[in-house]
Image (spheres, rainbow, N blue to C red):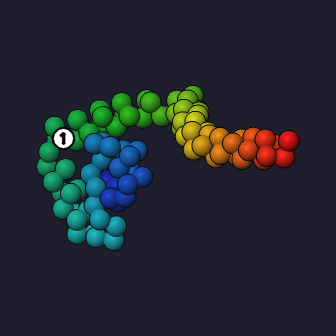
Amino acid sequence: MPRGRTDLPELRELARDAAIYFAPGHQGELATALSALADDEERRRAMGDRGREIAAGLTWANCGEVTARALEAAAAEAQDRAVPSTRRYSALISRARSGSE
């Protein structure tokens, strides 16, 4: 069954093209969207099919994999940013040692 969703980025990311969207607090937009959807059986069917397709991918295993990839990417990015600092620190230590020896 097609769904109506408030037009928020996190809901668009989740429902994608399987929902109709309306501005938060605008009941008139919701009423217009639902009325148009009520008159379009083919669109309702297509949105329902798409919703089931999206829902099939929303598993705990898939969520875990996506989360793990995001964490790995964030850790790699943090490591990439840390390397220049580590190099600068190592260079300072080397200079300090060579100057004191």
Observer-nearest of 20 and 10: 10
Amino acid of disc 1: Arg
> How many numbered tags mark residues here?
1
Q: x, y (%) of residue 73? A: 54, 36
**Label 1: which residue?**
43
Q: Quadrant of residue 42?
A: top left
Q: Nearer the viewer, residue 96 or 82?
A: 96
Residue at 48% x, 34% y: name it: 58
Residue 86 visible to the viewer: no
Q: Name the side, left or right, on which 16 lies relative to 58.
A: left
Residue at 18% from the left image edge and 41% from the top image edge: 43
Instruction: Residue 32 in the image: state x and y as whole percent.
Output: 18, 62
Q: Position of residue 68 (x, y in %)?
A: 59, 33
Q: Quadrant of the C terminus?
A: top right
Residue 17 visible, this orientation: yes
Q: Nearer the viewer, residue 84 or 58?
A: 84
The image quadrant of residue 70 is top right
Q: Nearer the viewer, residue 79 or 91?
A: 91
Query: What secondary structure is marked by label 1?
Result: helix
Q: Residue at x 34, y 67 (%)?
A: 24
Lateral position of residue 56 relative to residue 3, left or right: right
Where on the picture, by quarter, is residue 31?
Answer: bottom left
Give above or below for 18 relative to 5: above
Mark 1 neighbour density, 10 Å: few (under 14) some (14–19) many (20 or more): some
Left or right: 28, with 99 as reference point: left
Q: Residue at x 29, y 65 (%)?
A: 23
In this rendering, the answer to whether 58 lies above or below 84 is above
Q: Quadrant of the N terminus?
A: top left
Query: At which x and y percent is residue 21?
Result: 28, 55
Looking at the image, the residue that sits furthest to the right is 101
